Amino acid sequence: MLLHVPSVLDPGDLARVRALTTGAAWVDGRITAGTQSEQAKNNLQIPADAPAAREAGEIVLAGLAKSALFFTAALPRHIFPPLFNCYRGTTNAFGNHVDNAVRTDRATGKHIRTDLSATLFLSRPDEYEGGELVIEDTFGTKSVKLPAGDLILYPASSVHRVEPVARGARVASFFWIESMVREDDRRRLLFDLDMSILGLRGSVGDTPEVVRLTGCYHNLLRQWAVV
């Protein structure tokens, strides 16, 4: 499932994260690349243990916690601490690659299975040319370039790339999610069911039929979820 989650960061939080990343020290982005993606990766990152990355990451996590759409789509069990990258100048692209199946948080030693990948755009689209996130999966090939503060959520198993940035700088946060429901098709079914229930609740209220559908949702989640 490919999902656009708008306004994960409100204007105040977005401004704070942008200020933190602007003042940070950037290093070669291959510090977090796997064997295959290392060959395709040419960007900059803020080291995960840098104070700016930690503070900005906490702001991103707080924004995610307030997003009901993100929660119902991802059903997060664990979220890898948000990282931050930049594409500009000669460090301006990331070729086709697939994210590692398991990431390890160096601060805690905790392993996280990467069911979902997420990119939270921090630069406005008019601040750079190129830099589209291109994702290839069963839904086809999609090119994504979102407003600052918006997030794209997609299967971590997808082949994806970042097109070269021809002007300006593309700054974003990226991270992975281990879901309570591992299977993408089950998450999609639960998401569609939940969205339909919310729509019915808004139009007809909590009728007996809506209550039964809500029960079906939670019984499926109870059956499939690992917590």
Image (cartoon, rainbow, N blue to C red):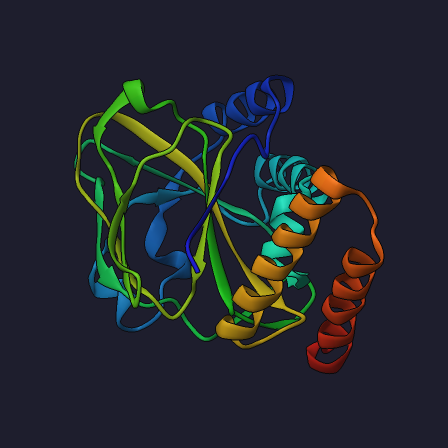
- State the quadrant of the N terminus: bottom left
Tell whether 111 sits left or right of 168: right
Tell me: 76 left or right of 88. Answer: right
Which residue sits at x=61%, y=48%? Answer: 70
Q: Position of residue 55 (x, y in %)?
A: 66, 36
Residue at the extreme bottom of the image, as rendered: 223
Q: Residue at x 65, y 44 (%)?
A: 199
Q: Quadrant of the C terminus?
A: bottom right
From where the camera sits, is residue 80 visible?
A: no
Q: Is residue 33 left or right of residue 15?
A: left
- Compared with 154, 10 (above or below) is above
Observer-nearest of 153 and 61: 153
| Residue 172 x/y as whole percent | 43, 37
| Residue at position x 78%, y 75% in the image | 219
The answer to whether 115 is drawn above or below residue 2 in the figure is below
User: Where in the figure is residue 181, as x and y percent of width and height?
Assistant: 63, 73
Visible residue check, residue 49: yes
Residue situated in front as seen by the camera: 51 or 186 = 186
Q: Nearer the viewer, residue 57 or 142?
A: 142
Residue 78 lies in what quarter of the image? bottom right
Count of numbered labels shown in the rendering: 0
Asked if 174 appears above or below 210 in the picture, the reply is: above
Q: Position of residue 205 (x, y in %)?
A: 80, 43
* Snapshot quadrant of residue 192: bottom right
